[in-house]
Image (spheres, rainbow, N blue to C red):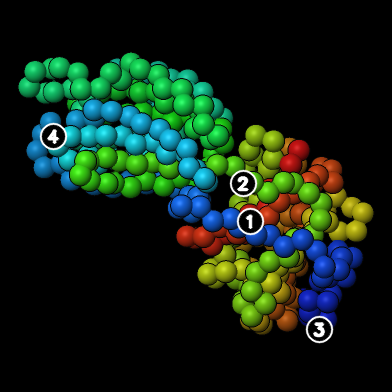
Amino acid sequence: MWTTPLRAGLFALTATVGLALTATTASASSTDLPAPTRTAPVTASGTATGPGNAKLVNVRTGQHAGYDRTVFDFTGGTPGYHVEYGTLVHGGTGEPIRVAGAATLVVVFNPAYAHDIDTGATTYDITRTLNPNLPTLRQIKFGEDFEAHVSAGLGVDDRVGFRVFQLHNPDRVVIDVAHQPGQPFGTATVWLGDAGGNTVVNGVRSGSHPGYDRLVFDLATAEPSLVFVGYRTTTSTIVVGYSGQNVPAVVHGPGTVHFGLPALRDLSWSVYGNGTASAFVTTTHRHGFRVMVLHQPTRLVVDVAY
């Protein structure tokens, strides 16, 4: 952690970027379910109790307000599953299978079948390709129905948040993939967070997406402390300023980070002794950006367009 004495607090942070308190505030919209935000792999057990029980019989898709839904219908209980971003492969040859979209969400059901193990009769034709062409979900292909494994790939427009859960009567496994954020990219300063909170940053991550780079601040608090995000005067440096109650602010990880992405170049931290901290993010040009707070776990996200 790097601590620099500073008494001016939030007003010093504001002066750093030369901005006023009357800037844009980030907001969220409500849907029937919140749009999923987690991208980590998901593994779960099913409810099928005997060999050959969990048989895939249908696949359905639909659009919701903040996400696209895929429903895998089973008979005989739900299978276990593992879901993560990766490459769908052919079960017999191991060859990669191209699925439309910028990323593929790979689903492996086990134990599961797309046929009746007693008669060999097909219960679902895995040679089918589904093309729902929804806002995020573009295509669904299958990789195998072999040795109690059924695999599928969901082609999506971006590496978005997803969730997986089971429903019963009838038995089904549901996968929701989030729509892209609705807020536009802009250059106006964004203010958000809790003025009474603490600044505890566990780390910083980044990644390139189609049309924008994403910067993620992993936070140890339920909500971010008071934060502003804005360009520093006329430069192409974005300042992410945190102002919390804890003294000093806590920032884990290296003091400088190199990204080398299309829009994001480098980040350097200044952590002060009065609970404030600033991340100075250099970009290739003065691009538009958008800011979001995601939960479970809590993250401050800054997307920078290119």
With 103 as the anchor, is 186 left or right in this view? right
Q: Is residue 40 above or below residue 218?
A: above
Task: Please tell me the numbered disc located at residue 7.
Answer: 3
Q: CA distance from mark 2 to mark 4?
A: 39 Å
Could one spot residue 288 in this view of the protein?
A: yes
Q: Residue at x 61, y 68 (%)?
A: 224
Looking at the rendered structure, the secondary structure element under dot 3 is: loop
Between discs 2 and 4, the one toward the N terminus: 4
Q: Which residue is mark 2?
A: 181
- Quadrant of the image for the N terminus? bottom right
* Mark 1 residue crowding within 10 angstroms, few (<14) / some (14–19) / many (20+): some
Q: Nearer the viewer, mark 2 or mark 4?
A: 2
Task: Please tell me the numbered disc located at residue 292.
Answer: 1
- The percent position of residue 180, horizontal first and vertical second, equals 59, 42
Amino acid found under the numbered disc labelled 2: Pro
Amino acid found under the numbered disc labelled 3: Arg
Which residue sits furthest left? Answer: 118
Q: Residue at x 86, y 68 (%)?
A: 20
Q: Is residue 195 above or below residue 144?
A: below
- The percent position of residue 291, horizontal first and vertical second, equals 68, 55
Q: CA distance from mark 2 to mark 1?
A: 9 Å
- Asked if marks 2 and 1 touch (Cβ < 8 Å), the reply is yes
Q: CA distance from mark 3 to mark 4?
A: 67 Å
Q: Which residue is mark 4?
A: 53
Could one spot residue 258 in this view of the protein?
A: no
Amino acid found under the numbered disc labelled 1: Met
Instruction: Tell how many labels.
Output: 4
Between discs 3 and 4, the one toward the N terminus: 3
